Image (cartoon, helix red, strand yellow):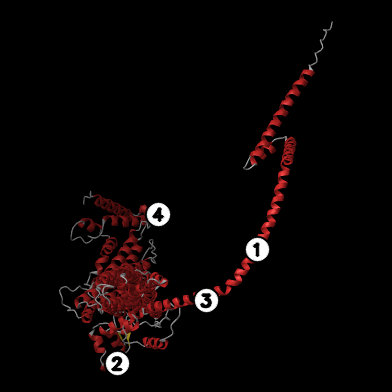
Amino acid sequence: MATEVTPKKPPDWKNLTDTVQDAESLRQESINAHHDHLITEIETSDGPLGTSLRAVYEGDELEKFKESLSDHIKNHDKEIERMCNYHYQGFIDSIRELLKVSCDAAQLKDEISDVNSHLQDSCEPLLTKGEELVKCRRVQRNIASAVENLTLCLPVLEMYGKLQEQMSSKRYYPALKTLEQLEHTYLPRVETHWFSQTMKEAIPKLRERIKDASMSDLKDFLESIRNFSARIGEIAMKHAAEQNNMDPAVAQSNKKLKTKRAPKPPNPFTGEIEKEGTEKSVIADSAADDMGELSAQDLIDFSPVYRCLHIYTVLGDREKFETYYRKQRRKQARLSLQPPSNMHESIENFKRYFHDIVGFFVVEDHILSTTQGLVNRAYMDELWEMSVSKLAASLRTSAALCKESEMMLDIKKLIVLFCHTLRGYGFSVGHLLELLLEMRDQYSDILTRQWVDIFNEIFNEDNYTPIYVESVEEYTAIVTQFPFQDEELEQASLPRNEETFPKRFPFSLFVPNIYTQVKAYINACLKFSADLHLSHTEIDDMIRKSTNLLLTRTLGSCLSSLIKRRDLTLLQLIQIAINMNYLEKSCSYLEEYISSITGAQSDSVHMARLHGTSMFKDSRSDAEEHIYSKLNTKISEFIELANYDWSLPESKGHASGYITDLVAFLQSTFMSFTNLPEKVAKTSCMSACKHVATSLMNFLMDNNVRQVSMGALQQFNLDLIQCEQFAATAPVPGIRDGTLLMAFADIRQLLDLFLNWDWSIYLADYGQPTSKYIRVKPSDAISLLEKLNNTDNKKKNLFAALKKGERDKKKLIDTVLKQLRGLVNGTASI
């Protein structure tokens, strides 16, 4: 059975409607109250209405506000209408009274106008006469006052005119005097006049204008003196060169400096350019171009300096002027001391640099002597010390970049002349002379670098063969160039012996060339010492030190590089060693030459000696060592051609071809040793023989050779005999008989031992001083005997054992080997 649903009760719509209506009425009342409040604010406010109007527009009831505003307007209109109706009658009465008063006023005005017209007509002649009288009285009074005042003012105006005229003509110092009179004498008389006060106020400005004008002239002077300094310096250095017996061309610049005067500046008061004196200026300029005896005051007008100094002194600003002048001149000194970046490229740049500095100090010296206190000696000394330090630094830097000795000499001459010039003006130049001593070392370095190329060129062009002369003239040219004494050549050079030519000098051409270039280097060093006021001993010492450096470092290094060249042949090395011998002897002549050109005593105890002798000895020793090495290398090349057949059954009956060629080579080589020192020739010969002997011994002791036959030993003996015959001929003079043979003694005794089969004698006499085979080592004998035994073992055949002689020989060899090994081990019993 379904459950019965109870229907919902409908809401009470009537009560809800009443509540809504009440809320709406309250809202409407609130809005009306708000609108009334805003309208009241608008009516009563005296200030801006922005806030009230914003409140109206921010709300959503604009139309209702308009309705409320219209209602208020209607109410006010009704109030206005009511009030106007109440006061209207009084207003009408007042208007009527006002109209009556207006008519009476118009009548009164017409009467007054008539009376005034009559009065004007009556008084017009009287007024005219009165005005004329007043004017006449005023004119009389003005004339009298004018005459009185003009009497007082005319002198003032005349002085002022004179002042303007003096200033226009740049007569600043008289203008300053006139200004003083005007201020203290004339202007007090006219203090009552307005222009007097104006003039008084203008006087300080006029003084400043005078100061500024004189300062402007001073600035023009400083600018012009900057341009003329180089020319002044050139003239001063030229005069100093003439006084010190130096070449004036040292100071003269090839590029003539233009000394044309600059146009005059415009007048600082009138702005006009003065044209007077143009012709005189041109004449002065042309004379300046041809100057010969002009001085600084002849070239430069110093009046702007003197004038400005007097003006500032009168005005009480002398100290300010002195400070300004010194400051500006210091700046100009720094500019003059600033070298151009490319000064090292041309001597003309150095000349202009020195001219500018000398000109600066000549001008300052003139100012020092012609003014009182503008510059003083303390200021000059301070400026000079600063300049010397900067000058020395600039010269060091620029001179360090110079690569040519001639330019260094020109720089040195300029510095010497610079020192002479400024010493004449009382400046100390000791530091600059010390700088010259520093530059002397640099000059020597430049010469050294130049002479490296000269020496190398001489070495490259030399043919390394003795010099041949075809005539007396050629002989004379060589002995004049190089001190060489040889009686045979001197006899041949006599006119009656001309048929003996050609003759040969023992040295090659590079000997006189090197000697000549060393003398040229000495002369170049001497050039730098000129005018340095050094004693003969100091010059001699300086040149000797430089020459020692040239010989020991430069020439020694070049010779060392030459000797080490791989392309030199043995004959060329021999010739170089010969040349070193003669150059070594020439050192004494170089010392005499240095003493002769410097004037120093050659026997002085303190005199430095040339180290060339030891250097040439060292170079000769180096060349000799290379000769030994080169000779041994050449011998090794011949030895390498050897091709022994160690299994040769019997000798060929003659020496091997390589030995024959080697002996021929040695004979021809040692013939060229004629001019070498005897000791060198003997040493070379002994070294060659030892090297040959050692090489032959190495053939026999070669571990790669396993067997040697008696025929091969006999052939080897023939080669050794060939070498011994060469040694016995004494290929170089001075070798005692048998000396060279001692080089082959070891291998000779070894071969004799085997060829003579003297084992019994060897073993019996071993260790005895008188032993026939004292030079044979047991180890060498063992090595060669084993190789010989190996050959016999290879040759024996199946039937060799049946031969009694072979068995005995084999037994003997074994016995000898055993005893030799015992000798080696120190256990032999003989």
> Decide: marks 3, 2 in contact (CB < 8 A)?
no
> Decide: marks 3, 4 in contact (CB < 8 A)?
no
Q: Nearer the viewer, mark 3 or mark 4?
A: 3
Q: Position of residue 250 (x, y in %)?
A: 32, 82
Q: Residues within 10 Å of mark 4 (few under 14, many from 20)?
A: few
Is residue 146 visible in the rendered image? The answer is: yes
Which amino acid type is marked by label 1?
Glu
Q: Residues within 10 Å of mark 1 (few under 14, many from 20)?
A: few
Please name the residue that numbered disc 3 is placed on: 132
Q: Position of residue 5 (x, y in %)?
A: 82, 10
Secondary structure under the numbered disc 4 in the rendered image = loop
Please tell me the numbered disc located at residue 111: 1
Please name the residue that numbered disc 4 is placed on: 797
- Taking the spot 38% from the left edge, 87% from the top edge, the residue there is 284
- Taking the spot 24% from the left edge, 84% from the top edge, the residue there is 486
How far apart are the alpha carbons under marks 3 and 4? 186 Å
Which amino acid type is marked by label 2?
Glu
Q: Residues within 10 Å of mark 2 (few under 14, many from 20)?
A: few
Going from the N terminus, do you reach mark 4 or mark 1 first? 1
Q: Nearer the viewer, mark 4 or mark 1?
A: 1
Please name the residue that numbered disc 2 is placed on: 499
Which amino acid type is marked by label 4?
Asn
Going from the N terminus, do you reach mark 2 or mark 4 first? 2
Quadrant of the image occupied by residue 108: bottom right
Residue situated in front as seen by the camera: 437 or 259:
259
Side (left or right) of 137 relative to 387: right
How far apart are the alpha carbons under marks 1 and 3? 33 Å
Q: Position of residue 6 (x, y in %)?
A: 81, 10
Is residue 728 visible in the rendered image? The answer is: no
How far apart are the alpha carbons under marks 4 and 1? 198 Å
Side (left or right) of 195 relative to 722: right
Going from the N terminus, do you reach mark 1 or mark 3 first? 1
